[in-house]
Amino acid sequence: MEVRDKVFLITGGGTGIGRATAFKLAAKGAKVVINYNRSEKEAVNVVDEITNLGGKAYAYRANVAVESEVKAIVSQIVTSLGKVDGLINNASVTAQIPMDDLEAVTDGVWDELFQVNVKGMFHCVKAVVPYMMEQQSGAIVNIGSVAGITGLGSSIPYAATKSAIHTMTKSLAIALAPYIRVNSIAPGAVDTKWWSGNEEKMYQLAGNIPLKRISTPDDIAEAILFQLTQESVTGQVFTIDNGQTL
């Protein structure tokens, strides 16, 4: 896929990996739509920065956990920009709970994480698919995690949701072929505000990293662009972790 003049929706696009991806796509001539729920200031800042650099960016608020809100913004995007060519499913939440503290893992924690991380991603896919099918092309990237591979993470429910994302990616790749490609990125430790105040835990979970570095949001964004643009890649989960899972 050539990204110039294509329209990409990035959920959770105001910060971290979503932000980095927005800038890389905009630099290549794409039109980027930044979805946010609570991070309005950050989303608007991304739009302003891209616009000042001569790019095209737009901000839309929606809680991905609410299907009606997702359908509404996708409809607005198509009405305003004419199409939607790519989706980067990046919005996610977590709960910082020690892995051995089972009592702290309440139904509320399970429900919130699955509602956003898994069902929210599915809501977004479900909303864009009719438009992508109509134009017979589209690319979707779901952001998973090495937690979904190793079982280690900020909490057991978080790891479980990320594993579900990886499996859902494969199922969707089969279901939506041949016109829509669906892939996933499983980042290891990434230097974002996600771990703000919990840096020590991040390094502890990361363990021995052969490359002796923590990924940046730009590192992950590069991998996302690869999956968006490579026409032969679908149903794949790319682990980007500096060797963390070796």
Image (spheres, grey):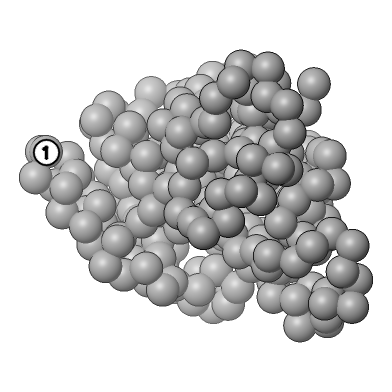
Task: Check disc 1 and give the amino acid type.
Answer: Leu
Q: Is residue 78 visible?
A: no
At 33% from the left edge and 32% from the top edge, which residue is drawn? 24
Instruction: Tell me the quadrant of the picture where the N terminus can be found.
Output: top left
Q: Position of residue 209 (x, y in %)?
A: 68, 24
Q: Position of residue 112 (x, y in %)?
A: 69, 75
At 68% from the left edge and 17% from the top edge, which residue is drawn? 210
Q: Is residue 140 left or right of residue 115?
A: left
Q: Position of residue 43 (x, y in %)?
A: 30, 60
Front-most of 136 and 26? 26
145 w.r.t. 235: above or below: below
Q: Position of residue 7 (x, y in %)?
A: 35, 44
Residue receiving disc 1: 53
Front-most of 223 and 16? 16
At 40% from the left edge and 61% from the top edge, which residue is drawn? 35
Q: Is residue 39 left or right of residue 243?
A: left
At 84% from the left edge and 59% from the top edge, which residue is drawn? 99
